[in-house]
Amino acid sequence: MSLIHNLQTALGVAFVVTVASAAGVTAQTQDVADSSATTTAKAVVTSNLKKAEAANSSIATLDNIKSDKTSEVSRDRDNSKKVAVADAPPAPGKMASETPGASPQTPTTDKWQFQVTPYFWMAGLHGTTGTTNRTTELDESFSDVFHVLNFAFMGVFEAHKDKLSVLTDLEYVNLEDDRATPGPLFSAVNAKVKTFIFDPEVGYRVYEDPDKGSFVDVVGGARIWHISTDFTFSPGILPGTEVNASRTWVDGVGGLRGKAALTDKVFLTGKFDLGGGGSKFTYQLFGGAGYSITPKIALIFGYRVLDVNYDRNNFVYDTNQRGPILGVGFKF
């Protein structure tokens, strides 16, 4: 009995130990499983947070790119507007040499602008010319001059940039007149007169109001003259004779020119200068109006007076030319 009792007691202890061991292994396994689950959950949360941060970063990058694109488009539009304004043609409307296409709102450009203006001056010729001891009086209206006109060329070229301008005015006239009044010593005279006048000038803008389309330039330069005369005097109290002479001289000149726009297409313009040096005295007056047909073409109409008094070296050319003037300006 004792043996059997001891065996039962031993088996009971072994069973309790086995159960306790199994319970400990189970508890450890559960702890490991719980720890693994916790670690996995943390990893998943961390991964999701990183993905969210990456997504937010991508969205911010896209927003920055969009903002940059918007800024670039805005800058391109601003630059396009600035280029369009800079390339707009300048306000025209100058004397016989003014730029066509008046535009009061046009700003001063920093690019060189050019214009050619051929014109026709319907001037009469009045005064005295010849040598000191053989002169003839000239009193020719434009109608008279036109009938004795052999050839004429007149034109203005202008280049301007910002406040600076360069002007040239060229005039060549070839006349032959059988009706000039010779005086009592001769019965008649045939007068051939060739006139070449070249005005190179520079100008500087001292006043400008783009809103009103007006400006004033100070101009200065030279007036180069070449006069050739050929007179054949018919016998009268004195026997007939021929007198040929030519002279070239240079006068320094200075003055003002200006322009004022009345509308987008109509403008007023004028110029005044005076000087001397080679001659005793010379002056010029011009006043007129213009109409812009297109931004690059304008009609100019006005009245011009050019006077000179030269009496040197046995040669006299004391004349006054005056009459209406008509020109067409081409800007490029």
Image (cartoon, grey):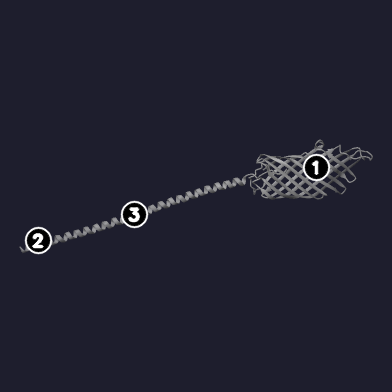
Q: Quadrant of the N terminus?
A: bottom left
Q: Nearer the viewer, mark 3 or mark 1?
A: 1
Disc 3 residue crowd, few under 14, some 14–19, many 20+, Cα 10 Å: few
Upstream in the sequence, badge 3 or badge 1?
Answer: 3
Secondary structure of residue under mark 3: helix
Q: Marks 3/2: CA distance?
A: 55 Å
Dots 3, 2 in contact, CB < 8 A: no
Dot 3 corresponds to which residue? 45
Disc 1 residue crowd, few under 14, some 14–19, many 20+, Cα 10 Å: many
Q: Marks 3/1: CA distance?
A: 102 Å
Q: Would you identify the image quadrant in which residue 231 lies?
A: top right
Q: Nearer the viewer, mark 2 or mark 1?
A: 1
The answer to whether 308 appears left or right of 296 in the picture is: right
x and y percentages locating residue 8 in the rendered image: 9, 61
Secondary structure of residue under mark 2: helix
Upstream in the sequence, badge 3 or badge 2?
Answer: 2
User: What amino acid does circle 1 point to?
Assistant: Gln
x and y percentages locating residue 139 in the rendered image: 84, 39
Task: Work out whether residue 150 or residue 318 is closer to the camera in this orientation and state it.
Answer: 318
Q: Nearer the viewer, mark 3 or mark 2?
A: 3
Disc 2 residue crowd, few under 14, some 14–19, many 20+, Cα 10 Å: few
Dot 1 corresponds to which residue? 321
Dot 2 corresponds to which residue? 8
Query: Residue placed at 12% from the left, 61% from the top?
Result: 12
